[in-house]
Amino acid sequence: MAPLADRFGRRFPYLRLSIIPACNFRCTYCLPHGYHAAAGAAAPLSLAEITRLLRGFAVMGMHKLRITGGEPSVRHDLTEVLRTAASVPGVDKLAMTTNGTLLSRRLGEWMDAGLTAINVSVDSLDRAAFARITGHDRLDDILTGIDMALAAGLTAVKLNAVLLRGVNDHELPTWLDYLRDHAISLRFIELMQTGDNLAFFRDHHVRAETLETELLDAGWQVLPRAADAGPAREYRHPDYAGRIGIIAPYSKDFCAGCNRLRVTATGDLRLCLFGEFGIPLRPLLQDDDQLDDLVRAIGGQIGRKEQGHFLHEGRTGITPHLASTGG
């Protein structure tokens, strides 16, 4: 079957699958009051449902999979989810995004299950600031886990830091010191407005281009975008072991490089993180014999994908917060 593509010529070999909406952090920009399940909320997809879902996407050319949450390590069968995902024919890159709280204790079993790459959310290298942002004083343990991941030989170790005006936007010098001898890719992510964070967004949004100007002035050079790359603009400098990526959703043509689809923890296909609707796939995940119907359903919906999001217009779609869809 031909790779999944939309009417704008974009191909989608990359799936981000949330396996649980719950998170054990209380990040100020996402879940400042902690996670609270809605009354009557459906349970996350079972292992069998996940297996059928991934087989369907793999038939359509998906070969890179990222497991997300909420916080995926909150799910007790995470290792089994990873092992199952890694065994799906066609999946050759298995990544996960995590807050890193269990990284130092469970990295080995996750890698044994098939994990090949990891992104860890670290919004500050200042211990007090990290605790204020996340609600947890866990920075030292998380940094230990990151060092273990680097030493373990994963194909990619990336850190994610959400830029927050007046909170962590002054920390570039500290990050540069860290990158001198840490061969990681640090991703600075521009704060995005969601359904429930408008006041916070107005107080703390800073344009990522400001940071890019600082990098260019300091001798960092933008790398050519790979053919299968996502929306991050990546920079390197000969004096540093690490690289810096900038994810700037409010920049011009940000969506032109979109190469991923998303499925929520309860099985809704999201064509865009900030889309206006979800397509329920769960009814097509109840039996192995439904594979053809699942493939037809996914292929039939891709034509509804918009050319870009509508964040510039203040339209955040049906995403109340990033944990609800997996970021």
Image: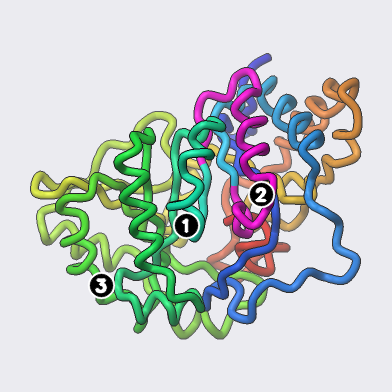
Helix or strand or loop: what does disc 1 sit on? loop
Residue 197 pos. (x, y %): 59, 78
Three-letter amino acid code at disc 2? Ser
Three-letter amino acid code at disc 3? Glu
Relative to the observer, which residue lies in front, 315 or 110?
110
**Residue named by callout 1:** 100
The answer, for residue 321, to whether it is visible in the render is: yes
User: What is the total number of numbered labels drawn onto the structure image?
Assistant: 3
Three-letter amino acid code at disc 1? Gly
**Residue named by callout 2:** 18
From the image, which quarter does the C terminus lie in? bottom right
**Residue named by callout 3:** 171
Alpha carbons under labels 1 and 2: distance apart: 16 Å
- Quarter where residue 48 is shown: top right
Callout 3 crowding tier (Cα within 10 Å): few <14, some 14–19, many ≥20: some
- What label sits on residue 259 in the rendered view? none
For image coordinates 62% across by 29% down, the residue present is 5
Relative to the observer, which residue lies in front, 125 or 103?
103
Alpha carbons under labels 2 and 3: distance apart: 30 Å
